[in-house]
Amino acid sequence: MAEVANNDMLTEMLIAKMLEDDMKQLENARAAEQFQLSEALRSSALAAGQFPKEIQQVPLGSSDHDVALGVLAAEIIANKDAVLAQALQQTEDSNLVLSRQYAQKLAAAEKKCALDAEFAKRLQKAFENGEDDVDMHDAESVLGQDMIENIMAGDMNDKGKGKGSAPNRGKDREHAPPPYSAQVKQEEGDTSNPYPTCGICMEPFQATYSPAAAARSANSSSRLQFGTHLPCPQAHAYCISCLNGYIHSKLDPEGTGSGNPSTVVFPIRCPECPSAEWPEGIPDHIAERVLSEKGMVLWHHQKLLDSLPRHYCPNPRCSALVQLDEDSDDPQALCPSCNTVICVPCRVVWHDDLTCEEYQALPLDDRAPEDQKAIQLMKAENWRRCPSCSFIVELTHGCNHITCRCRTEFCFKCGSLWDRRNKRCSREPSCELWDEEMLLEEREREREEREEARRARQPVPPPPPYVPRAAPAPHVYVHVPVRNHNDDLTWMDDPDVLCTRHWFTAEMINTLTCQYCDTKLTSLADLRYHLRHVRWHAVYACCGRFFKREVDFERHLDAQVTRFGGHLHTVQRN
């Protein structure tokens, strides 16, 4: 507000100065007009042959405009004088306020000096009497609350008059230290500060044994804040305001006064020390010196809550506080927030298809529901885990010798470590280096990808028009029982079963070409794997023969078989 008033005053003075300059310009213009008129008269006299003895200025006369300008000039001068008087008055008031504040600081310093003097007298008396009390930490513990209030409430102007009640009069007050503002404004080059600095607000404060009690007994509004040092290894210092706010942010973050029942608060650690360096946290006796009575009630209430057992919902998207009855025979509990079923003995989401003993026998990395799904997928896709880092590895091509990203070498087939000296797996007996079944699977996968790409490039033909057909007449035939519907085509290597006189079968075996799709294969095993796993055409086989059409296959099944006494190795894949 004072700065705004000063700006307004400066603005008024500037306006008055500008108006005064305008009035001076008008006066100069009027004087110029008078001089021009006198010069004109002088020139006329000379032209008439007369020489004037003395040139006199001709008055122009006073009009209403001239009178108004004179009044305006007088008002401008009066306003300028008023603004100047106001500025002088404001300066005097500011000096009076500063003097009063400085007097208050001096009075507070004198009271502090009196308190220190009385405290020193008590300590000296105790030392002379041989009383070495470890509790004599500050003035409050030595003098008592009543004595401190009497000293701080005494009138410092009654020195030597016998009117005051303060016990420390006389020469002790002559050595009172200057106020903090005077100590800060020291000689140039001396920047030492006798007060500690708060680690949160970075402001100086006055360290004391009990900041809360010192703040209640102090009666000066311009004093420094009180504070204390924490008993941490670094002895960090904080003022009472910042330390109070820090503790309350832990005890009651919502500001409702009901504490923090959903979170474990204690121990409340130092704001600057790492948790490993000072795990004990702020003790109770430090809290009693900093917090108010209401704050200590909240402190003990939160400590009681933290001492009770707490259980949280194991669902990572919930984590709500859950009441669990450990004495109940029911091992399940229900989270009231997300309705997740919880296993009470294991403290996890309910594990289906596993007992508590089986679940706890699992490695820690495989216990989560997501990990269980990953393990099931790994088994279904025939993946393998690295025995060193447990990273999941997929073998898409190549041999069974695997080198993980952690540089561990192992066998993909059995998971054993790889013997680099003997170039085989360490299992006895060792596994084969190459897995032919896996190589055939890789080739078949490549064929499927090429076939899908080819079909994607071909245009989709329009559907044929609908032509109603009459229901076929029922066909009655005697069906010979089939011995095996899920043949693996191993009979393709057996000359006693393979029918080489059948042209379709002989062409397929001799040329190693799939007669259904004209795919060229590399070996008989490759042909067998292709016929077992192909998905874009049908396969019909029975009694050592392959059939190109389903109608031929059905006709063969209806016929009487004399070679094997019945149908053998029947395969039908549509």
Image (cartoon, helix red, strand yellow):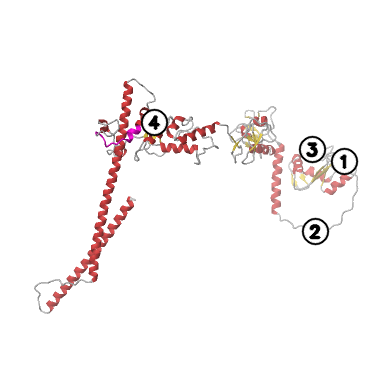
Counting other residues with Cα less than 10 Å from the Cα at mark 2, is it few (<14), some (14-19), or many (20 or more)? Answer: few
* Gap between marks 2 and 4 measured at Cα: 100 Å
Check disc 2 and report the residue beneath it.
Answer: 466
On screen, residue 469 above or below 108: below
Mark 2 against mark 4, which lies toward the viewer? 4
Q: Residues within 10 Å of mark 3 (few under 14, many from 20)?
A: few
Q: Which residue is mark 4?
A: 209
Disc 1 marks which amino acid?
A: Pro
Q: Secondary structure at mark 4?
A: loop
- The residue positioned 19% from the left and 72% from the top of the image is 61
Tell me which residue sits at (37%, 23%) in the image: 133
How far is mark 3 from mark 1, CA to CA? 21 Å
Q: Nearer the viewer, mark 2 or mark 3?
A: 2
Instruction: Tell me which label, 2 or 4, sits earlier in the chain.
Output: 4
Does residue 559 appear left or right of residue 278 in this picture?
right
Instruction: Give the farthest residue toward the front.
Output: 163
Give the residue pinned by disc 1: 481
For disc 3, the marked residue is 490
Give the camera-side residue of 251 and 58: 251
Q: Residues within 10 Å of mark 1 (few under 14, many from 20)?
A: few
Q: Is residue 21 above or below residue 201?
A: below
Ranked by sequence position, the earlier of labels 2 and 3 is: 2
- N-terminal label among 3 and 1: 1
The residue lying toward the viewer, choosing from 162 and 214, is 162
Q: Earlier in the sequence, mark 4 or mark 3?
A: 4
The residue stretch that appears in magenta: 148-160
Closer to us: 284 or 158 = 158
Q: Marks 2 and 1: CB-CB under 8 Å?
A: no
Q: CA distance from mark 4 to mark 3?
A: 93 Å
Residue at left offset 70%, top offset 44%: 445
Quadrant in which residue 27 is drawn: bottom left
